[in-house]
Image (cartoon, rainbow, N blue to C red):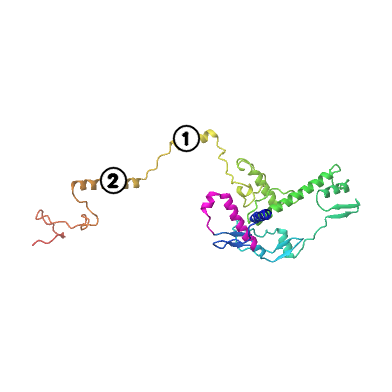
Amino acid sequence: MDVVKEVLEKHQKDLEKYKPITVEKHLECRVDVGMMLISDPNDLNEQELKENRATYLLQLTRDNTQLLINDIWQLPTERVDECIVAKLPPPTTILPRLRKVPGPKPLTKWEKFAKEKGLTKKKKDKKVYDEVLDKWVPTYGFKRSESEKQKEWVLEVPQNADPMTDMFQEKIDLRNEKVAKNEIKRMKNIVRAKKDQVPRSGYLGAEVASSSNFLTAATVAKSSTASVGKFQEKLRNEKEARGIGVKELIPGAKRKASHISDQPESEANLDLIKSVLNKKPKVDIEKAVSLQKQENRIERESIVKAAGGKTKSKKGGKRKGNRQFAAKKPKGGRGQKAVGKKSFGRKRR
């Protein structure tokens, strides 16, 4: 009997390690199987959380994970390479993004042209057979240049060129020039995609430069000095580039012209001192008179108020006319009446 009892106790202990798959919750949890997300709206047990936080959180996580796994096992499954795989539905929870969804990549100038003309890009093979070297060589990459060196170990000098010209260096310079042109086109594509203006370029070389490019390059060279080209002498029959300012020519912040002039420094300092010493303060006479009148009026009103009288108002009382044009009072018999002169006074009775 003791053996049977020990076996049953051991089995019971083993069963305690594996908890049941059924989990009871007061409020139903929200499960998003497509996002592998579960939200538990139930309140936490504060007493258990204070007594043993780690054990309580571990138990809570285990129960919620069990609920999520139960919903996953209800989905349709299939076997892939001896593994059971569940087909997840589309997610229902919308997660916020830190940045906006990236839009389509803007097309380059060539891509737009190819799209309009219906041109398709042909895929090149990684390797082609070279009959001269009698082997397969890559079509691009660093090994391509090695194969070209093996193939073109000698170069022919043209008849119109200097016989001492290094044709290998000429080839390297031509390749570097093509790389630079491609880089310029790439930068222009970026600026065009951002809808910004491309700064005017300088000298592009005698082969591709036009007259306007020469004018622009000359203006850029002159305005690159500290005085922004103020003291640069002009060449004979030289023209200035039209519609070009310092801001458009030189990238970066707008440059200001130097304060230095042709006048000697001593004369400039004397003029500055004279302008400071001879400067008289500007006085507004009309404003000063009006302020003085206002101060006098306020002073009179304060005196009258202190004496207990009333100030005269402009609106109150009858307005008297100008005494210059008023009728003269009679003199009351003083003097003699002039003969032949009309009197404008009141008649005597």
Q: Can residue 35 be seen in this view?
A: no
Q: Residues within 10 Å of mark 1 (few under 14, many from 20)?
A: few
Residue 195 occupies quadrant: bottom right
Out of 105 and 333, give the one closest to the viewer.
105
Q: Quadrant of the N terminus?
A: bottom right
Query: Mark 2 or mark 1: which comes first in sequence?
Result: 1
Q: Mark 1 points at which residue?
A: 273
Out of 196 and 321, give the one closest to the viewer.
196
Query: Measuring 81% from the left and 46% from the top, which residue is drawn there?
Result: 170
Amino acid carrying label 2: it is Glu
Secondary element at image label 2: helix
The vertical placement of 49 against 230, above or below, is below
Position of 315 with respect to 18 (left or right) is left
* Pointer 2 with pointer 1, Cβ within 8 A: no
The answer to if 49 sits in the magenta stretch is yes
Of circles 2 and 1, the one toward us is 2
Q: The magenta stretch spans which residues?
A: 42-70
Residue 330: percent from left, percent from top: 13, 56
Secondary element at image label 1: helix
Q: In which quarter of the image is the C terminus?
A: bottom left
Q: Main secondary structure of the magenta part?
A: helix
Position of 226 with respect to 270 (left or right) is right
Position of 104 with respect to 258 (left or right) is right
Q: Name the residue under label 2.
A: 295
Residue 34: percent from left, percent from top: 64, 62
Amino acid carrying label 1: it is Ile
The vertical placement of 293 against 314, above or below, is above
